[in-house]
Image: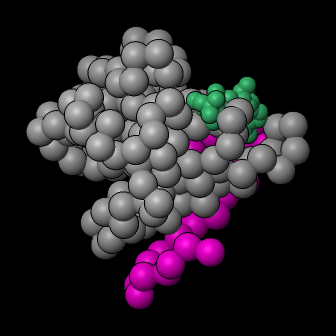
Amino acid sequence: MTGFQPGTRRVVVQTGSAAATRALAARLAEVAEPGDRLALLGPLGAGKTEFAKGFAAGLGVTETVNSPSFTLMAEYAGRLPLYHLDLYRLSGAAEAIDGGLLDEREAQGVTLIEWADRMGAEVDPGRLEVRIAVEADETRTIEIRAGSSRHERFLDAVAAGAPA
Ligand SMILES: Nc1ncnc2c1ncn2[C@@H]1O[C@H](COP(=O)(O)OP(=O)(O)OP(=O)(O)O)[C@@H](O)[C@H]1O
Ligand SMILES: [Mg+2]
C-alpha cells in the first residue's frame, strides 16, 4: 500500500489500445509546465514508453521517441524541452545523481522518468505519478495521481477529455 496524503486526488482511466494511451498522454502534455516531473510506473511492457511517445507528441515533438534504456536520458525539443529517462538499469538515486541525470535543466522542461521507483523506496510526492497496470492484451488501467496541488491541472485535463 502506498501512503495517501491528505487532499491527494487521482483519476483512473482504462485504455483499450496503445493509441488510446498515447492520446491520453498527449492531453496531459497540453497542460504541462516547466519543472513538471512525471513518474511512469508499471511492469515491463506496461506501456510507459507508449505514454512517453504520446506525451512527446502532445508537446509538439516531431522526433521519434524511443526507449532510452541504453542512453539513460534522451532530450527532445517541443513546446517545452522534454527529458526522458529510464532508470531500469540503475540501482539507486545516488547513481542517478552521480550520472548527472538530475540537473538544473529539468527546471526548464518536463521530465518523464520510467521506472522512477528505482530511485528509492517511495516515489517523490512532488511528481505526478502515472501507474500503468496490464489488464489484458490491449487493455491497461492507468492511475494518475497528483502528488501535490500543482498537479491538479493534469487531473482536470483527463476529466475534460473524451473517454480514452
Ligand atoms: N492500452 C495499451 N497501452 C499501452 N501499450 C499497449 C496497450 N495495449 C497494447 N500495448 C502494447 O504494449 C507494449 C508496451 O510497450 P512499452 O515499451 O511502452 O512498455 P514499457 O512499460 O515502456 O516497458 P519497459 O519497462 O520495458 O520499458 C507495446 O507493444 C504496445 O503496443
Ligand atoms: Mg519503456
* Relative image position of residue 41 (x, y in whole percent): 56, 48
Is residue 110 visible in the rendered image? The answer is: no
Residue span colored magenta: 1-26
Name the outermost residue toward the bottom. Answer: 6
In the image, residue 61 sits, relative to residue 35, either above or below, namely: above
Q: Is residue 8 within the magenta segment? A: yes
Question: Dividing the image into four equal quarters, which quarter contains ligand 2?
Answer: top right
| Viewer-nearest residue: 75 or 12 | 75
| Viewer-nearest residue: 136 or 119 | 119
Q: Quadrant of residue 82?
A: top left
Q: Residue at x 51, y 42 (%)?
A: 115
Q: Quadrant of residue 120?
A: bottom left
Q: Residue at x 31, y 30 (%)?
A: 83
Name the outermost residue toward the left. Answer: 104
In the image, residue 16 sits, relative to residue 61, either above or below, namely: below
Q: Residue at x 12, y 39 (%)?
A: 104
Is residue 146 visible in the rendered image? The answer is: yes
* Relative image position of residue 43 (x, y in whole percent): 68, 43
Seen in the image, is 116 located left or right of residue 140?
A: left
Q: Is residue 62 within the magenta segment? A: no
Seen in the image, is 158 located left or right of residue 1?
A: left
Q: Residue at x 35, y 20 (%)?
A: 74
